[in-house]
Image: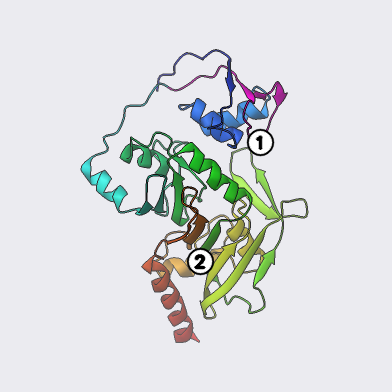
Amino acid sequence: MRNSAPSKVRLVTVSEEDAGQRLDNFLMRQLRRVPRALVYRIVRKGQVRVNKKRARVSDRLRVGDVVRIPPVQQAAPAPQRAFDEAARTRFEALVLYEDNDLMALNKPSGMAVHGGSGLSWGLIELARAARPRARRLELVHRLDRDTSGIILLAKKASVLKALHAQVREHRLKKIYQALVAGRWPRGCALVDAPLLKNTLQSGERIVRVSSEGKPSRSRFRVLAACERVSRIEVRIETGRTHQIRVHTLHAGHPVLGDEKYGDAGANRQARACGLRRLALHAWRLGFEHPATGQWLELEAPVPQLFTEVFECLCQQKSATG
């Protein structure tokens, strides 16, 4: 792929429309054809400055902040893949809710939320292609590539800012369903364990429980269980990277199908029952609509596969027991 010539140093003043955004999200809008990894690298090296000072990608910008953006090599625009009628039909099937301010989608397992790392298309790119008039369409939050379920997108900067405030203040109600290895203990309704994120040289993110980590709380409720598997509901009070996957591991019952944190033996048994994905689904999402003030609760149907795998594993146990 050809690259365009490096741009000159730019000084960009943060407007009211962009205030409240994280620095990395602001830079991704300014540098549309730059990989996210490069954005993180130039911030880490101090090449990006906010009000002439070093900054972190997680810093939130305020009105009047001056952001120094260094010259970077931007990729030439890639040839646009046709968003044909078949692709449009598949995308529309993902839409759970939509109005003039926001939309909620049911992300499939295996689909990244944004392009990068060799992926030309992610969920946000598909949404922008399907809604070209929504020029400010942005992700409100993220899901791991292998996690399915409900994800929220804002169509206006003011709506994005208001929803990000709800995220920061832990006012979004996020409930997941998962299949985990073994019988979940009755007394384990809350895992309150700080999480520390590490990034390996390869770029892979690894999260572990550590007293040096950030406070992290997950609440669990058992929906059904047998000796080999439990179907659980998880409400997260914080939104840390890989939070549910690491908290279930910490409790001794990792999510089935998890190749990073899971149990190899339990995963083999689940694969024999047809599980070829991470058994984690973002089921329900509640939030206050920024435009109307109304409380909305949306739901993404749990894949039928979860029921089939659960029943298969429980039947195997009873047959062999």
Tell me how many marks there are. Answer: 2
Residue at 66% in and 69% down: 190
| Magenta span includes 144 | no
What amino acid does circle 2 point to?
Ala
Q: Secondary structure at mark 1?
A: loop
- Residue 178 badge: 2
Q: Going by the picture, which residue comes out furthest to the front?
A: 292
- The residue lying toward the viewer, choosing from 298 and 260, is 298
- Residue 17 position, x and y percent, is 53, 32
What amino acid does circle 1 point to?
Asp
- Residue 2 badge: none
Give the CA separation, mark 1 to mark 2. Answer: 32 Å
Q: Mark 2: few, some, or many residues within 10 Å (few <14, many ≥20)?
A: many
- The residue lying toward the viewer, choosing from 278 and 281, is 281
- The residue lying toward the viewer, choosing from 253 and 111, is 111
- Residue 59 badge: 1
- Residue 86 position, x and y percent, is 23, 46
Is residue 127 rendered to the left or right of residue 257? Answer: left
Please tell me whether residue 90 is drawn above or below residue 261 in the rendered image.
Answer: above
Please tell me whether residue 271 is drawn above or below residue 172 in the rendered image.
Answer: below
Q: Which residues are magenta?
A: 49-75
Q: Main secondary structure of the magenta part?
A: loop
Dividing the image into 4 quarters, which one contains the N terminus? Answer: top left
- Residue 205 position, x and y percent, is 60, 45
Name the image colouring: rainbow
Q: Mark 1: few, some, or many residues within 10 Å (few <14, many ≥20)?
A: few
- The residue lying toward the viewer, choosing from 278 and 112, is 112
